[in-house]
Image: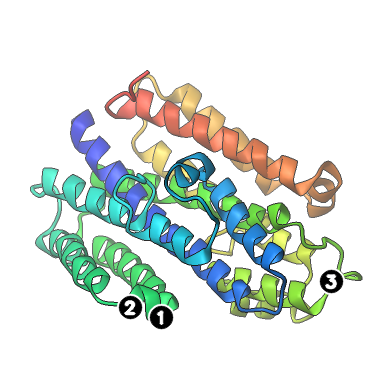
């Protein structure tokens, strides 16, 4: 497959997943901001969200204060914010249009219709009156895109690069969503968890479609350690770091070329650390430090994939 075609497919998938995960993170903050709390605690949650997304500087260049509605507007509709939902879904459509001949008609129509629907929804007052409904729509369109892709496309290298982009982005965003809690400064131990912490963790689990899964796996009270184990080490949890790395390694193997052996080994080591890791060891080392290292490694892996298969990133 031509590098430029692979590049468009890879980034089409990454931007789809990024839009979905931005919606998930925003939805967590919208839900937790409705809990009883001080103004400073509320602002801290929005500040943590911007920090995890590495958007503090860009946000403060445009806004003087830190209000939830301003953060939502910045992360949803601001075209100058390259991680905003509008910017991501626009990039999805542009990348899909560049490789229409590689996609099935159904996949292209989903991407195009999503972009058109987004314009209509943002012209209404839905984002102001019911932001959670808008975020659910973003998640639904992402699910629909993945389902139509797997249901209509030939299982060749095109699908492998789409899956590779999807799971690299998902691994990055799951780690960020989990880390938001620790930047927010809530308690870490089950014994000291307040009612607010319980609802916070519940909202976070729902943000990764993990609440029902948690109940099925653990059948017990929600604790931070078990949530971390579920989202990091459980290979049967679809959005966990291990599940994502399983997919990354598998799809890298399918598209391997003469120069990709080192990248495969790098990805394999990341997966092995998760596959044979123990949550007690991770918590002893510090969850935030572990997630920070993982994010750095995912960033490096993305650069290696670009170098070996795609149009090289500008230096």
Label 2 and label 1: CA atoms lie apart by 5 Å
Front in this rendered view, residue 127 or 92: 127
Q: Tell me the number on the disc at residue 130.
A: 1
Secondary structure state at the residue bearing disc 3: loop
Q: Is residue 33 above or below residue 186?
A: below
On screen, residue 286 versus residue 184, left or right, reads: right
Name the residue: 72% across, 70% down: 38
Q: How many marks?
A: 3
Q: Which residue is mark 3?
A: 193
Residue 315 horizontal/vertical position (percent): 37, 18
Q: Position of residue 29 (x, y in %)?
A: 57, 67
- x 72%, y 42%: residue: 290
Mark 2 to mark 3 CA distance (whole Å): 34 Å
Compared to 298, does 226 lie above or below? below
Which label's residue is closer to the chain start, 2 or 3?
Answer: 2
Foreground label between 2 and 3: 2
- The N terminus sits in image quarter: top left
Q: What kind of element bears circle 1?
A: loop
Residue 181 in sight in this render: yes
Asked which secondary structure carries label 2, the reply is: helix
Q: CA distance from mark 1 to mark 3?
A: 29 Å
Instruction: Please give the residue where the numbered disc 2 appears in the rendered image.
Output: 126
Whether residue 107 is situated above or below residue 87 in the rendered picture: below
Front disc: 1 or 3: 1
Per the rendering, the mark at residue 30 is none
Residues at discs 2 and 1 in contact (Cβ within 8 Å) = yes
Tell which circle, 1 or 3, labels the residue nearer the N-terminal end: 1
Residue in front for this viewpoint, 46 or 24: 46
Inspect this view and state whether residue 156 appears.
no
């Amino acid at each position: 497959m031509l590098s430029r075609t692979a590049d468009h497919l890879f980034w089409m998938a990454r931007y789809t997943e990024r839009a979905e995960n931005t919606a998930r993170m925003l939805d967590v903050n919208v839900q937790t901001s409705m809990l009883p709390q001080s103004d400073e605690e509320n602002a801290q949650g929005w500040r943590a969200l911007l920090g995890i997304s590495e958007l503090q500087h860009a946000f403060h260049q445009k806004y003087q204060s830190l209000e939830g509605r301003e953060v939502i507007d910045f992360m949803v509709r601001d075209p100058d914010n390259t991680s905003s939902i509008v910017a991501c879904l626009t990039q999805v459509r542009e990348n899909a249009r560049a490789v229409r001949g590689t996609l099935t008609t159904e996949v292209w129509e989903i991407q195009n219709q999503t972009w058109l629907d987004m314009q209509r929804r943002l012209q209404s007052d839905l984002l102001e009156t019911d932001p959670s409904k808008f975020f659910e729509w973003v998640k639904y369109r992402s699910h629909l895109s993945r389902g139509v892709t797997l249901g209509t496309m030939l299982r060749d290298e095109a699908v492998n690069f789409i899956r590779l982009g999807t799971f690299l982005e998902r691994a990055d965003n799951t780690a960020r969503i989990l880390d938001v809690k620790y930047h927010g400064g809530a308690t870490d131990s089950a014994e000291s968890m307040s009612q607010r912490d319980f609802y916070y963790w519940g909202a976070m689990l729902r943000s990764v479609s993990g609440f029902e899964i948690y109940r099925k796996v653990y059948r017990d009270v929600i604790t931070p350690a078990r949530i971390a184990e579920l989202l990091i080490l459980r290979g049967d949890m679809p959005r966990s770091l291990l599940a994502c790395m399983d997919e990354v390694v598998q799809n890298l193997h399918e598209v391997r070329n003469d120069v990709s052996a080192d990248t495969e080994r790098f990805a394999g080591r990341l997966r092995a650390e998760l596959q044979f890791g123990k949550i007690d060891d991770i918590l002893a080392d510090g969850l935030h430090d572990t997630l920070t290292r993982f994010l750095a490694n995912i960033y490096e892996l993305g650069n290696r994939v670009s170098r070996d298969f795609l149009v090289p990133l500008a230096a």
